[in-house]
Image (cartoon, rainbow, N blue to C red):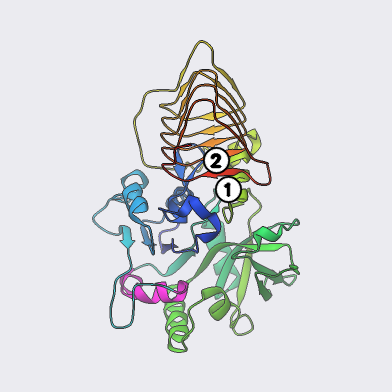
């Protein structure tokens, strides 16, 4: 367990790539896996590592995120000393309230960083999903005498749509990072950053102040890449499952991957529980004519139709005669009688009226915005 580190989660990542999924919410608040939000996984990783001081930097559309996190009770962060700190943007002489990058966001919360008593800082984004602890990463950081340690995983394949926040690392035989590429068209390395960075708090303060003084605001390009030869930057290899939600296609694929038992067991490990906001509802109810194959169904659902290879969130209603195949339906969605849906993502409270037929493709699912009526 780590007792000398604090965490900072930046939720101001560019959300335009997720289109209608982030129309009224930040990436961190996007529902995932039947009952979770994206930020639940990073929060749980930090809490399971022993961190008791976590700051969440918000940017835009953060009402849903603040409502979800609340006081941090579900993560055992509602405490008198340290705990969960929501850090929304605010206007000062130096800060206009709109961050152009992570450096500006960290500069705006420098007071929180300065007051944190822990020695190490763990910086993380909000669109990468995995389940681990950072204990081994900190141990390696100390043993190697690194200034900065970046978690990465290995991805051999590359899709053009994944060219977003793609930080590629080149390492030598000792694991030290010798070069970096940001959003490369043809990556020169299979080692991809997991958007988790570990360093001492004092070094973080210095790097943020130096970058800010030179009018620089992007942490990856202006801090890490510029200092790769000056600082000892090492990589920490994570071999587990990693999902990155950087497009509607990747969001759809990551949810569908949960239907694989091996992926599900790795992401929802009993050793490292994933915590989320508790909503007590009745169990899912299946009607006499219902049919369900290989699907994740959350509590509160009513299934009277047929579902196959679907992920249904809380309170979804599938009427008699409706057929859903390879679909994702978020909380409160209603699919009325005799509908036929295939490769469709329904956001919260979407209503599909009787007799409608919608069909997308595995590589291009149909996405219905929150509250839509079709």
Q: Residues within 10 Å of mark 1 (few under 14, many from 20)?
A: many
- Residue under label 1, please give it: 251
Of 9 and 7, nearer the camera is 9
| x and y, in percent, of residue 158 in the image | 73, 58
The single residue placed furthest to the bottom in the displayed view is: 214
Of 210 and 121, nearer the camera is 210
Judged from the image, the secondary structure of the residue bearing numbered disc 1 is: helix
How many angstroms separate mark 2 from mark 1 (CA)?
A: 10 Å
Judged from the image, the secondary structure of the residue bearing numbered disc 2 is: strand
Frontmost of labels 2 and 1 is 2
| x and y, in percent, of residue 357 in the image | 59, 31
The single residue placed furthest to the left in the displayed view is: 80
Identified at 47% across, 64% down, the residue is: 122
Total count of labels: 2
Q: Residue 107 colored magenta?
A: yes
Q: Is residue 315 above or below residue 8?
A: above
Q: Which mark is residue 345?
A: 2
- What span is in magenta? 100-116
- Mark 2 near mark 1, Cβ–Cβ under 8 Å? yes
Q: Residue 14 colored magenta?
A: no
């Amino acid at each position: 367990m780590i007792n000398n580190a604090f965490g900072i989660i930046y939720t101001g990542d560019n959300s335009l790539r997720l289109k209608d999924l982030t129309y009224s919410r930040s990436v961190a608040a996007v529902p995932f896996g039947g009952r979770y939000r994206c930020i639940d996984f990073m929060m749980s990783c930090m809490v399971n590592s022993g961190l008791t001081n976590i700051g969440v930097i918000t940017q835009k559309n953060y009402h849903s995120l603040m409502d979800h996190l609340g006081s941090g009770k579900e993560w055992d962060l509602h405490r008198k000393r340290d705990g969960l700190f929501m850090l929304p943007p605010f206007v000062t002489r130096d800060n206009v309230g709109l961050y152009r990058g992570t450096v500006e966001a960290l500069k705006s919360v420098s007071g929180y960083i300065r007051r944190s008593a822990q020695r190490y800082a763990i910086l993380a984004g909000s669109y990468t999903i995995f389940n681990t602890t950072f204990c081994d990463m900190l141990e390696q950081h100390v043993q190697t005498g690194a200034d900065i340690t970046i978690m990465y995983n290995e991805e051999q394949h590359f899709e053009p749509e994944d060219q977003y926040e793609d930080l590629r690392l080149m390492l030598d035989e000792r694991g030290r990072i010798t070069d970096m590429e940001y959003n490369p068209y043809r990556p020169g390395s299979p080692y991809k950053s997991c958007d988790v960075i570990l360093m001492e708090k004092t070094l973080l303060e210095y790097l943020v102040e130096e970058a800010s003084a030179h009018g620089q605001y992007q942490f990856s390009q202006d801090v890490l890449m510029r200092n790769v030869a000056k600082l000892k930057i090492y990589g920490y290899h994570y071999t587990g499952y990693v999902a990155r939600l950087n497009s509607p296609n990747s969001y759809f694929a990551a949810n569908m991957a949960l239907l694989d038992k091996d992926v599900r067991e790795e992401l929802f490990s009993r050793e490292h529980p994933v915590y989320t906001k508790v909503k007590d509802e009745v169990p899912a109810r299946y009607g006499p004519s219902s049919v369900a194959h290989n699907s994740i169904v959350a509590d509160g659902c009513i299934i009277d139709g047929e579902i196959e290879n679907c992920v249904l969130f809380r309170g979804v209603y599938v009427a008699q005669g409706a057929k859903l195949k390879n679909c994702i339906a978020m909380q409160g969605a209603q699919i009325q009688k005799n509908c036929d849906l295939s490769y469709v993502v329904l956001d919260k409270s979407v209503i599909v009226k009787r007799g409608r037929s919608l069909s997308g493709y595995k590589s291009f699912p149909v996405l219905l915005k929150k509250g839509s009526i079709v």
